[in-house]
Amino acid sequence: DSGVTQTPKHLITATGQRVTLRCSPRSGDLSVYWYQQSLDQGLQFLIQYYNGEERAKGNILERFSAQQFPDLHSELNLSSLELGDSALYFCASSLGQGMAKNIQYFGAGTRLSVL
Amino acid sequence: GESVGLHLPTLSVQEGDNSIINCAYSNSASDYFIWYKQESGKGPQFIIDIRSNMDKRQGQRVTVLLNKTVKHLSLQIAATQPGDSAVYFCADIFLGGSQGNLIFGKGTKLSVKP
């Protein structure tokens, strides 16, 4: 168990809908990262938050947004969903900046199916 | 652009043999490298890391080798076991960049034959 909790584990929805994925980082970790993993693809970095503030953006669509709350949990919002958004979404957390503090620990993921 | 890639998408080994998983990276300024293991239905799990000022690091049954001259990273697993079957990702990070985030390769699937 990595200590990172993601809910829900599975999500089935229809095109055009909006969903929210939730992540609770490991105790003490200040950074939260979101990744998308499609079938047979590697991990695509979406966005990072550090202590409540957006720190870095990757290949995140404009239809997607995220935030990190004062208690450090994070939510990833996906809107106007398309079939191609079906994927595994992972959250990871790390202590923060610097060498070893950048080791990211991953949650079990949320499997999103858009029908 | 910056990329981290893997030489082989799949690797099949006999139980008890040693496994070697290779990875190439493109950013010569990368500071830090990490190997992750992802079992089916689970999130990636940290295995071992190595700093750019090292060329070898050993863990329990695993060894990571770094060759900065050719920008190559490898993960060696000794006495491979069925439980080692998974997809292995390498990732690198450049701490001097604005992001300082991990860039993952596509992964190598390791299958262990009993």
Image: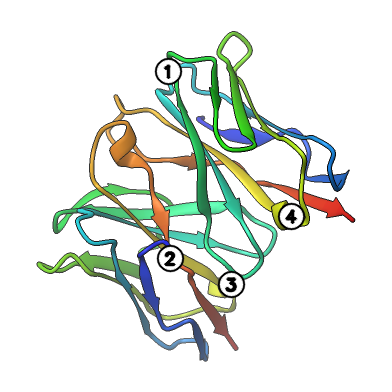
**Is B55 above or below relative to A98?**
above
Q: Tell me the kind of residue under disc 1.
A: Ala
* Residue B86 visible in rendering: yes
- Which numbered dot is residue B29? 1
Residue matched to label 4: B85
The chain letter for the residue carrying disc 3 is A
Q: Amino acid at mark 3?
A: Gly
Separation of marks 2 and 1 at Cα, in angstroms: 29 Å
On the same chain, marks 2 and 3? The answer is yes
Instruction: Identify the secondary structure beneath mark 3.
Output: helix
Q: Are marks 4 and 1 on the same chain?
A: yes
The image shows residue A55, relative to residue B28, as above or below, that is below
Viewer-nearest of discs 4 and 2: 4
Q: Which residue is mark 3?
A: A84
For the point 48% across and 69% down, which residue is it?
A108
Question: Which residue, as the protein is rendered here, is positioned at the far top?
Answer: B69
- Rendering coords of residue B95 (x, y %): 31, 28
Amino acid type, callout 2: Gly
